[in-house]
Structure formats: structure tokens, C-alpha cells
Image (tube, rainbow, N blue to C red):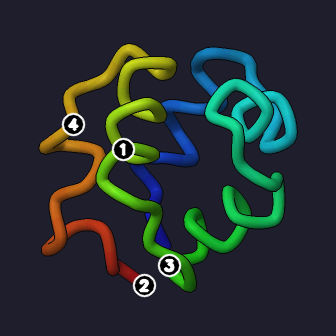
């Protein structure tokens, strides 16, 4: 689970669908990403970090990204 992504999205008051639309992704990909079952492209990861106004490295740190 990517708890950092979930927390950052909720802090911004965004639904999975709203975030997905901002990035140009299907909302199911956001759901899968939050559950650690999909890895967005580098471009998508950068857009997500920018939209959520959070640090890229913190959001996508591989050691923390796959916490269960």
C-alpha cells in the first residue's frame, strides 16, 4: 500500500477520480497504485507529485511504497 499517496490525496481533498482526471489516467489506475498493484509511468508519477504538492522522492520511495 502506498500510504503516502493516499494521505497526500486526502489532504488535498481529492477523490481518486479527481486525481486521475487531473493526471489524465483512469481512476482505476489510481486505486491500483494506492494498493501497490500498478506503477505509474515516470511522467505520471511526476504529475501526481506536482498536483498533490508533495516531494517526488517521498511519494515514490520504493522502500516505503510497498509497505503492507
> In the rendered view, does 11 fall on the left or right side of 16?
left
- Report the residue marked by disc 3: 36
Instruction: Give the answer, above or below, for where 64 lies relative to 27.
Output: below
For the residues marked 1 and 2, what is the alpha-carbon distance in whole angstroms?
A: 25 Å
Residue 61 drawn at (x, y percent): 16, 59
For the residues marked 4 and 1, what is the alpha-carbon distance in whole angstroms?
A: 11 Å
- The numbered dot on residue 43 is 1
User: Residue 45 versus residue 7: which sits nearer the camera?
Assistant: 45
Element at label 3: loop
Residue 43 drawn at (x, y percent): 36, 44
Q: Residue at x 70, y 64 (%)?
A: 29
Badge 2 vs badge 4, beta-carbon distance below 8 Å: no
- Report the residue marked by disc 4: 56
- Report the residue marked by disc 2: 68
Q: Residues within 10 Å of mark 2 (few under 14, many from 20)?
A: few
Quarter location, residue 64: bottom left
Of the image marks 2 and 4, the number of the one nearer the N terminus: 4
Badge 3 vs badge 4, beta-carbon distance below 8 Å: no
Residue 52 drawn at (x, y percent): 48, 22
Element at label 4: helix
Q: Which quarter of the rendering shows the C terminus?
A: bottom left
For the residues marked 3 and 4, what is the alpha-carbon distance in whole angstroms?
A: 16 Å
> In the rendered view, does 10 fall on the left or right side of 58?
right
Q: Residues within 10 Å of mark 3 (few under 14, many from 20)?
A: some
Disc number lying in front (2 or 3): 3
For the residues marked 2 and 3, what is the alpha-carbon distance in whole angstroms?
A: 9 Å
Amino acid at each position: 500500500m502506498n500510504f503516502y499517496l493516499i494521505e497526500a490525496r486526502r489532504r488535498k481533498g481529492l477523490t481518486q477520480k479527481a486525481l486521475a482526471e487531473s493526471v489524465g489516467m483512469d481512476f482505476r489506475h489510481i486505486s491500483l497504485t494506492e494498493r501497490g498493484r500498478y506503477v505509474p509511468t515516470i511522467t505520471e508519477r511526476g504529475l501526481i507529485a506536482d498536483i498533490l504538492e508533495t516531494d517526488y522522492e517521498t511519494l515514490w520511495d520504493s522502500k516505503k511504497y510497498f509497505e503492507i
